């Protein structure tokens, strides 16, 4: 449908995203996510970012996702076990359905709390036939350390969760693609490193400066060569200026620009070959 368009005209066309619906909307999502001439170094595809963000914000995309049976099932099964808003869940759904499905690899969430989001990701990934694992990393005992000079949240916040209770839900749902990894990121990530496939999606939701900083630096060398998605939740959250600082430092160090700025920050990164492990 869009093959004769340039990036500039794509963006112009997306101004009318509110008019797209049904099959036309689905077709636009498929074509824009896969169009090689829209993809910059590192995998960034601004047109795809616009289509997701503007579609969810102003267009018919919210209704389209809301009516999708797989989305509905995943939304209901996690029983409200996430702090994240519905538009965030929807954007993850779109990433999985229109891009990550074509990028075989693993998914990691740094900071899973009650694991509603991790359950959602694992259920949708399985439903779409995505083969990789979803790793959910958390202490399951709250934030392990915080720096009062920059972090608003304190050590022990978010401790009202249970590793055993979440494990039971996973068993009941037979979600064997979801792996819980207990402990601080600094301890747990090195333990799973050698098993990891290239990362197609990383969700950083660790709240504090040091946790977000660690998660970003640990994950980036493992990203998929097509440009794995790095979604940073807390940077735009009113109580997480430390997470924003860690994100700003990443932008400076890795020279990254976002693919999407709403409902959360989405970056793409493909590591140079010599950094891969
Ligand atoms: C905002 S909550 C995560 C919310 C969750 N993603 C959701 O969908 O509801 C932040 C979580 O990060 C965890 N966390 C923060 N720093 C951590 C670290 N260094 N190691 C392990 N877990 C950490 C906390 O224990 C907490 O459960």
Image (cartoon, grey):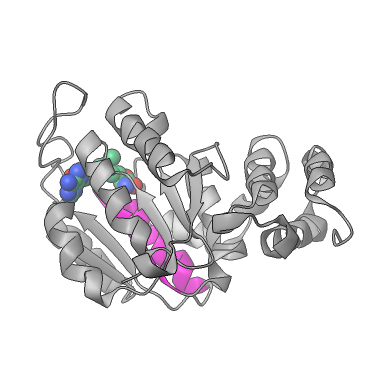
Percent x, y of residue 10: 80, 47
Using the rendered view, name the quadrant where residue 32 is placed.
Answer: bottom right
Q: Position of residue 168 (x, y in %)?
A: 20, 67
Considering only vertical position in the picture, is 137 above or below 167?
above
- Closest to the observer, 226 or 129: 226
Magenta segment: 105-127
Tell me: residue 180, above or below residue 162: below
Q: Is residue 48 above or below residue 98?
A: above
In this rendering, the answer to whether 7 lies above or below 188 is above
| Image spot of residue 187 (x, y percent) | 11, 58
Residue at image location 20% in from the left, 61% down from the top: 189
**Residue at 43% from the left image edge and 69% from the top image edge:** 273
Q: Is residue 120 magenta?
A: yes
Quadrant showing the N terminus:
bottom right
Ligand 1 shows up in the quarter that is top left
Q: Is residue 141 left or right of residue 92?
A: left
Which is more toward the observer, 273 or 13?
A: 273
Q: Is residue 149 left or right of residue 117?
A: left
From the viewer's perspective, tell me whether residue 140 is left or right of residue 247: left
Q: Position of residue 235 (x, y in %)?
A: 38, 33
The image quarter containing residue 16 is: top right
Seen from the viewer's position, the closer of residues 2 and 90 is 2
Report if residue 81 is visible in the image: no
Q: Residue at x 36, y 23 (%)?
A: 238
Task: Check if residue 123 falls in the magenta segment.
Answer: yes
Q: How many marks?
A: 0
């Amino acid at each position: 449908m869009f093959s004769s368009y340039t990036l500039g005209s794509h963006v112009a066309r997306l101004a009318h995203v509110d008019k797209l619906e049904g099959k036309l909307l689905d077709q636009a999502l498929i074509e824009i996510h896969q169009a090689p001439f829209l993809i910059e170094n590192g995998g960034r595809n601004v047109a795809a970012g616009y289509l997701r963000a503007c579609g969810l914000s102003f267009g018919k995309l919210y209704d389209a996702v809301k009516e999708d049976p797989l989305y509905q099932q995943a939304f209901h099964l996690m029983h409200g076990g996430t702090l994240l808003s519905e538009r965030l869940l929807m954007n993850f759904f779109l990433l999985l359905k229109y891009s990550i499905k074509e990028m075989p690899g693993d998914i990691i969430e740094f900071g899973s709390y009650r694991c509603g989001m991790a359950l959602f990701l694992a259920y949708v990934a399985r439903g779409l036939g995505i083969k990789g694992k979803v790793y959910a990393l958390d202490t399951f005992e709250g934030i392990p350390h915080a720096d009062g000079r920059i972090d608003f949240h304190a050590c022990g916040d978010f401790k009202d969760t249970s590793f055993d209770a979440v494990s039971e839900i996973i068993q009941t749902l037979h979600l064997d693609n979801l792996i819980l990894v207990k402990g601080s990121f600094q301890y747990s990530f090195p333990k799973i490193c050698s098993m990891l496939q290239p990362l197609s999606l990383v969700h950083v939701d660790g709240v504090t400066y040091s946790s977000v900083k660690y998660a970003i630096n640990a994950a980036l060398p493992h990203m998929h060569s097509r440009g794995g998605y790095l979604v940073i939740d807390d940077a735009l959250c009113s109580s997480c200026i430390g997470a924003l600082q860690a994100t700003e430092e990443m932008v400076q160090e890795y020279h990254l620009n976002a693919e999407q700025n709403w409902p959360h920050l989405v970056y793409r990164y493909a590591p140079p070959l010599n950094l891969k492990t």
